Amino acid sequence: MGDRLSSLKVERPNVTLRELALEKMRSAILDARFLPGDRLVERSLCEELGVSRTVVREVLRHLETEGLIESLPNQGQIVAILDTDTAAEIYEIRALLEGEAAMACARYADDDVVAELAKCIEAIQHAFDTHAHHAVRAHTTAFYERMFTGGQKNVAWEIVQSLTARINRLRAMTIASDGRGQQAVQEMRRILAAIRSRNVLDARDAARAHVERGSEIARDLLSGGQTNASCKRADGNVRDSAIVLQSAMPYKKQQARFIKP
């Protein structure tokens, strides 16, 4: 009976075409190759990504659930506009959850968890040193996942995961700001030091301070670019996705267009 049932198992590749296309599009938004308000045209994306319209539609629907794109009446789908109020709310949620997770991690984590957190921070430092911002985001997510699970805050981590795309979009802005690399790593080392010494209150305060500093940087960046983004949306002055993909530039080169009115 066991052999008969096992033969029904459907074999599938580890990564599907849809997942590959989703990662490409998500990275394009996080790396600011698509700017807030840019129009996403299905036909153009099919050609540029080399996938079917069905795949593109599935990807766009998924990105909309993540809050990275939005649909506008008579305009179709665009890259979601970042605004200070939404950003502030996300950082507020982060401060509450990460502060609690840091306290719990300081209380429950064993030496193996502490060692893994330290390894994540070293990887983040290396990524900053080599200007690999995509790696910074990935290793930072890994750090927090281990902190939450090490503190037995699994449900809280599930909540954070639902915001991961928006968190990483804000993180992509802040880590590209001058001097943030060294500052961010120092702040995370303070979190780790408190966890290692089992000081639950210091761990909470260090985690919240780290989030609050990121919030301040994001607020300053968004305040500088919010007027321009709002005008772009109101006027319907959006760029075609094909033009975006053909002229894609690294984040730093496009940052000025985003933060300055």
Image (cartoon, rainbow, N blue to C red):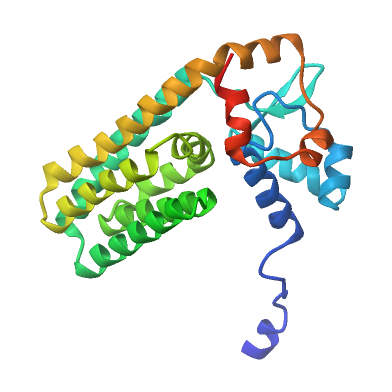
In depth, the one of 3 and 231 nearer the eye is 231
Q: Is residue 1 visible?
A: no
- The number of discs equals 0
Quarter holding the N terminus is bottom right
In the picture, the quarter occupied by the C terminus is: top right
Residue 255 drawn at (x, y percent): 58, 30
x and y percent of residue 138 in the render?
48, 54
Please name the residue shown 64% across and 26% down the image: 36
Q: From the viewer's perspective, tell me whether residue 156 is left or right of residue 106.
A: right
Q: Is residue 151 above or below residue 85?
A: below
Residue 46 makes an appearance in the image = yes
Residue 191 place in picture, x, y as percent? 22, 48
Relative placement, left or right, of 176 versus 115 is: right
Q: Is residue 15 above or below residue 144?
A: below
Q: Please name whichever residue, 36 or 70, is drawn nearer the observer in this view of the structure.
A: 36
Foreground residue among 33 and 230: 33
* Residue 217 lies in quadrant: top left
Give above or below for 237 relative to 15: above
Q: Which residue lies at the image location 48% right of the left edge and 49% below the top edge?
A: 137
Q: Give coordinates of residue 180: x percent, y percent.
A: 38, 39
The residue positioned 47% from the left and 19% from the top of the image is 84
